[in-house]
Every structure is written in structure tokens, then in C-alpha cells.
Image (spheres, rainbow, N blue to C red):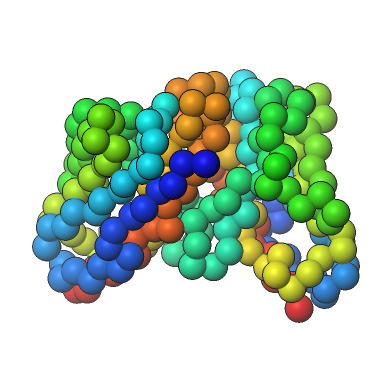
Amino acid sequence: GIQVEQSPPDLILQEGANSTLRCNFSDSVNNLQWFHQNPWGQLINLFYIPSGTKQNGRLSATTVATERYSLLYISSSQTTDSGVYFCAVESWDYKLSFGAGTTVTVRA
Amino acid sequence: EAGVAQSPRYKIIEKRQSVAFWCNPISGHATLYWYQQILGQGPKLLIQFQNNGVVDDSQLPKDRFSAERLKGVDSTLKIQPAKLEDSAVYLCASSLGQGTGYTFGSGTRLTVV
């Protein structure tokens, strides 16, 4: 299966700081999603982004499919941004594989 | 639209007991997935259904886990007998079809003691 690597594994931010999370994948993919897992375990879809750039408020994401990576940007971080961020890639046979996640802690 | 519904939210059982989880996907979503998420790891696919047929169950421990999707809508995942290492969050997801993204339920947190 496709290998998905996320970095960094852990990130501690001061409220108001900006950050970048990275996702590398080992093969060409059909699609890519970024999720935020809240403290109650719910996986919330942030972006569905097989290629290009998308923005939603303080979050934005860029996927460069030809180079097999995606970036998630968090600007002006808030304490509510804390949680685990997962990158998941969909293979061409419609299997969704997850990375190990980046745990983000935003301190007030 | 209503999201993916799962129940129960929490379950504590003793090892060697059996347990079942239920999932109701988003209406019209043909594809349904069960994932297992062990603490500190990313979710791992257990089984994928397309309507009521199994597409992939290669990662499902078939000696103790079983799943079905009757009439191509609701699904149940069963563990019998449970082991300590089955303690995890079990997530259900559904998708309208290829290239349309996945929506996850809130999950069932299983603790085996």
C-alpha cells in the first residue's frame, strides 16, 4: 500500500503563531484529504485536495501531486486548533491510507 | 445532510466477551468503511463495502472479527471473542463514490479489560 509520512510528529505553538504541517506519500494518488481529530475523537474533514491550493479561513492547504507531498498551513493559531491533524491519501483502487498524524498543541 | 451515525459511543467489556458496533452511513453513500484506530496511531482500514458487497477485507482478523452490511445501508462490526489488543476506537466512514471524499462518524471507543 501507499506509505504516508507526516511531519513533524508534535508541534507546540503559542497562540497567534503560524505553522506548516507536511505530508509525503510514496506513490501517485487519486485524492488526498486533511482531517482534524478533536479531543473527542471525531475526524473532521478540513480539505479534500488532490492538487492545487485551497483556503478556508485561517487554514489553507497545497498539494503538489507530481512531487508527492501536501502542506497544511495554520495561520494565527488559536487554542481550538489543538488536536491531531491527519493526512490521508486515496489510492487508485479507492483505499484510504492515513499517516501517523501531527499532534498540535496551541498554548494561550 | 445528516452525518455518519455510530453507536454505542463507549463500550467496556472483559476479554473473551463479544461486542457489536453499528453504523448508519450518509443517505445515498454506496461505499462504507470500518477503521480501527489504536491510541497514538492513524486509523487502519479493516473492511470496505460497496453497497452490500465486500470490496476489501484483507486487514480484517477474520478469526474474531466479522462485518456485514445488510441491504446496502446500515452495517455492523462484531468482535468475538475480544482480546486486550482490540482496545481502540472503531470508526465508520462513508463515501458517495470515487473521488468524492470520506465522512467519518464519531466512533466507538472500546476498552477490553
- Relative to B72, A56 lies left or right: left
The residue positioned 63% from the left and 28% from the top of the image is: B31
Check the image and report above or below for B79 versus B17: above
Q: Indicate the quadrant where residue A104 lies.
A: bottom left
- Relative to A27, B113 lies left or right: right
The residue positioned 72% from the left and 40% from the top of the image is: B57
Instruction: Give the image location of residue B84, x and y in percent.
Output: 74, 73
Instruction: Give the image location of residue B102, x and y in percent.
Output: 50, 34
Check the image and report above or below for B95 versus B110: above
Q: Residue furthest bottom?
A: B113
Which of the pair B68/A29 is nearer the observer? A29
* Residue A87 visible in rendering: yes
Instruction: Give the image location of residue A17, x and y in percent.
Output: 11, 62
Instruction: Give the image location of residue A11, x and y in percent.
Output: 25, 67
Q: How many marks?
A: 0
Which image quadrant: the C terminus of chain A? bottom left
- Relative to A83, A14 lies left or right: left
The residue positioned 88% from the left and 70% from the top of the image is: B16
* Residue B91 visible in rendering: no
The residue positioned 22% from the left and 28% from the top of the image is: A52
Q: Indicate the quadrant where residue A14 lies.
A: bottom left
